[in-house]
Image (cartoon, grey):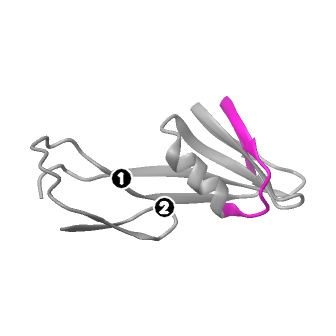
Amino acid sequence: MNKRRDVAGYVTLGGSGGSTSQEPQELEPGWMKISNKKITGGTIIRSIDEGSLMPCKEACFEDKDCKGFYYKHFGQKCYLYSGDIDFELDTTLSKSSYKIMRNYSSGFQ
């Protein structure tokens, strides 16, 4: 039985499942925080207004097109982006950006 942590840190258990495919499975991602910068380029996927970072991280992880998001500290809202993203200085110092670094299993365990 395989144990994996999802993006929220919960342990999920996986058995053999009877499947013989060796497709890689997505594991818990890494996050690169870029303080006082906002995302430029790319395309806004959607905004999330839930008051904390965790819903933003979970939504980005679930949307396979998501490359990252920026989080507004005042108002506690985030904007998820897809495509070719870049970062530029936020002169208001009210935003931080997070770039997702997706991790996959090798498929051979």
The kind of residue tagged 2 is Val
Prevailing secondary structure class for the magenta stretch in the rendered image: strand
Q: Nearer the viewer, residue 20 or 85?
A: 20
Please tell me the numbered disc located at residue 103.
1
In the image, which residues are magenta? 37-53
Q: Nearer the viewer, residue 20 or 57?
A: 20
Which numbered disc, 2 or 1, marks the residue closer to the eye?
2
In magenta segment, residue 47:
yes
Mark 1 secondary-structure assignment? strand
Residue 97 image position (x, y, % from top left):
68, 52
Q: Nearer the viewer, residue 101 or 17?
A: 17
Mark 2 secondary-structure assignment? loop
Residue 11 image position (x, y, % from top left):
38, 71
Please tell me the numbered disc located at residue 7.
2
In what quadrant of the picture does the N terminus appear?
bottom left
In what quadrant of the picture does the C terminus appear?
bottom left
**Residue furthest front in the image:** 18
Identified at 66% across, 47% down, the residue is 69
